[in-house]
Image (tube, rainbow, N blue to C red):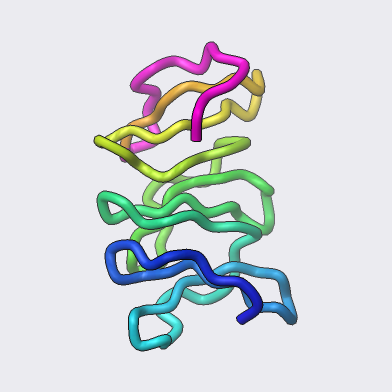
Amino acid sequence: WSLARAFSEGLAAVMRGSTSRWGFVDTSGNLAIDARFDDAGSFSGGLAPAKDHDTGLWGFVSAAGTWTVSPAFAGLGSLEDGKAPARDAASGLWGLVNETGSWAVPASFSEIGL
């Protein structure tokens, strides 16, 4: 692993240097989610933002490594109080989405704090 992020909910995002892909390890250092993402954030509320290698878009993955919100966003942060900053792929504007990927605050901002 060439880079690692802090543990959150028992998992940490790590980057495999040979592929520059991100996955997740557990607190014992065992690979919990295969390194197949172009980028990944921290778990919160049982979900982590991850950037799909094929589409270049962001969605949420579960601790099992499955997409719970299909990649559809140009940017996506971790959940905080049930909402995450998200960048609409079509307009490029930012808003807030909930854990299902629905807009809680419509994308209408040119910038948003991450």
Q: Is residue 3 magenta?
A: no
Q: Quadrant of the N terminus?
A: bottom right
Residue 57 vs 4, above or below: the answer is above
Furthest-top residue in this view: 108
Left or right side of 37 for 26: left
Looking at the picture, how far across and down is residue 75, in whole percent?
58, 38
The residue range painted magenta reads 99-114
Q: Where is residue 12, by image quadrant?
A: bottom left
Percent from the top left, x then y, of residue 63? 33, 65
User: Camera-side residue: 105 or 54?
Assistant: 105
Residue shown at the point (63%, 29%) measured from the top left:
89
Residue drawn at x 67%, y 49% as measured from the top left? 55
Question: Is 92 drawn above or below residue 73 in the view shown?
Answer: above
Residue at (54% x, 71% y) in the render: 4
* Image x and y of residue 110, in percent: 62, 16
Q: Is residue 55 left or right of residue 47?
A: right
Residue sitting at 74 percent across and 81 percent down?
18
